[in-house]
Amino acid sequence: MARLTVLGGAESGVGAAVLAKVKGFDVFLSDNGKIKEEYAAMLRRWDIPFEEGGHTESKVLSADEIVKSPGIPDSAPLVKKLVAQGTPVISEIEFAGRYDSAKKICITGSNGKTTTTSLIYYLLKNAGLNVGLGGNIGKSYALQVATEKHDYYVLEISSFQLDGCYSFRPDIAIITNITPDHLDRYDYKLENYVKSKFRITQNLRPEDCFIFDSDDAITIAHLDKIVLKAKSLPFSQEKELSQGAFLRDDQIVVRYGEDESSIYLKELALGGRHNVYNSMAAALAAKAAGIDNSVIRESLKTFKAIEHRLEPVLSVGGVLYINDSKATNVDSAWYALDAQTKPVVWIVGGTDKGNDYSQLAELVREKVKAIVCLGVDNSKIHAAFEGIVGADRMVDTLSAEEAVKAGAAFAEDGDVVLLSPCCASFDLFKNYEDRGAQFKEAVRKL
């Protein structure tokens, strides 16, 4: 019996452990930290041995194969030892893909991937298909492969998950865009991060589809360096395309084969330039999956915004509070600021990932009246924006409640208080969901 060890005891790792158990592996799970009770209970229910609070190296190093959770970097000492001794280290996505014959629509990118993934899932559900949602969103892909049966999966896949993929192959692969992000995990080299994202295309066949933003310079530059076997379906807001999605007369036009369909921008459920791109990618994926134009059009009209992504929370005293906690990089924050039509009090800050804030200077000058810093170290934010908004219009806070109160003090009737942090959350919060939830709770207490 092959021995498989799972590193990491959260959604991804526990799902992989259950699948390994179902497939007859001698499985063991090891987590360096505390495992949440819901996950520990699942491991006990499936009679899967596990440890928490540290790794027993002898047990880990004796495995035939390792499934590593995406939050564990390749630079971790134990991972380095495994690689040095030749033990295969793979991701949950790679492992689950071995046992899954369903059609897979897989989405990666620096920004917009969660919204695009959710849109595609909504489109397929509305078309009456038997579809699962997983990857970096929803329930573990591996757990679904172990315990459910779907004809389609829509998977949001991060660069960290792709790093552990070797044979995994989507039927439809999407890169929403590529901007500098997570460079601390890639030796601060953009090229390494780009190559990681493009791993989603590495096993595509001629009958598969690759959907991408042809306005994105980084994506296009890398496309010129690789041989792509799949059918290309670009989308653009800047030029007309013979195949793909583009803008014409305030409409999204989708051309797929001999078919052409359209929807007016004003009919889209999601506003903002970034969501036009997301809607284009989703519509192309739906067309490639054989979904009827009428279902696509109706779904793009009725989709509801996802939590923590430009999510309107509440209007208090004529001030609208927006939760964009998922904006963890410069580009996400750029789109959030660009989408605003009213004066903005911007809540920003957290764990900096090598951000270049100069890209936001023009937008801040145009849109932002005050800045509330929410983070342990806000020195880079002050250096970037004090000269634009003024030192007296910037304040430092260390909690969501404190940040919301400071934002309310700056805001006037007709303003927007926007939490779009531009940074990771781990200095003050468990994750971006925790940050967003605390922000919303603080707004409700105003």
Image (spheres, helix red, strand yellow):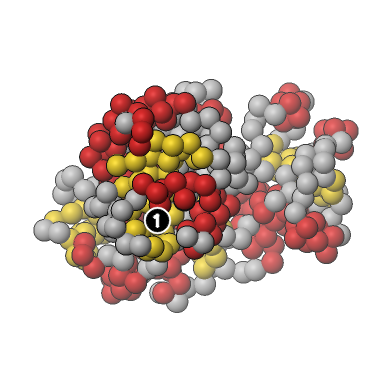
Percent across and percent down for residue 208 are 41, 52
The quarter holding residue 369 reads: top left
Residue 309 visible to an observer of this rendering: no
Judge left or right: residue 374 versus residue 221. right
**In the image, is residue 326 above or below residue 266?**
above
Dot 1, how many residues are within 10 Å of its Cα: few (below 14), some (14-19), or many (20+)? Answer: many
Answer with left or right where residue 165 lies relative to residue 340.
Answer: right
Residue 66 lies, in percent from the top left, at 74, 40
- Left or right, residue 374 beside residue 8: left
Q: Is residue 89 above or below residue 344?
A: above
Q: Amino acid at mark 1?
A: Ile
Residue at the image point whose x is 72% and y is 44% from the top: 8
Q: Is residue 374 above or below residue 133?
A: above
What residue did someone put label 1 on?
322
* Farthest left residue in view: 249
Q: Residue at x 82, y 38 (%)?
A: 54
Does the rendering let one see residue 352? yes
The residue sitting at 11% across, 58% down in the picture is 249
Front-most of residues 370 and 207? 370
Which secondary structure lies at badge 1?
A: strand
Name the residue: 52% across, 68% down: 131
Residue 163, how many percent across, how many down?
A: 57, 37
Give the mark count.
1
x, y percent for residue 405? 47, 50
Figure check: 293 above or below 426: below
For the view shown, which residue lies furthest in the bottom direction?
128
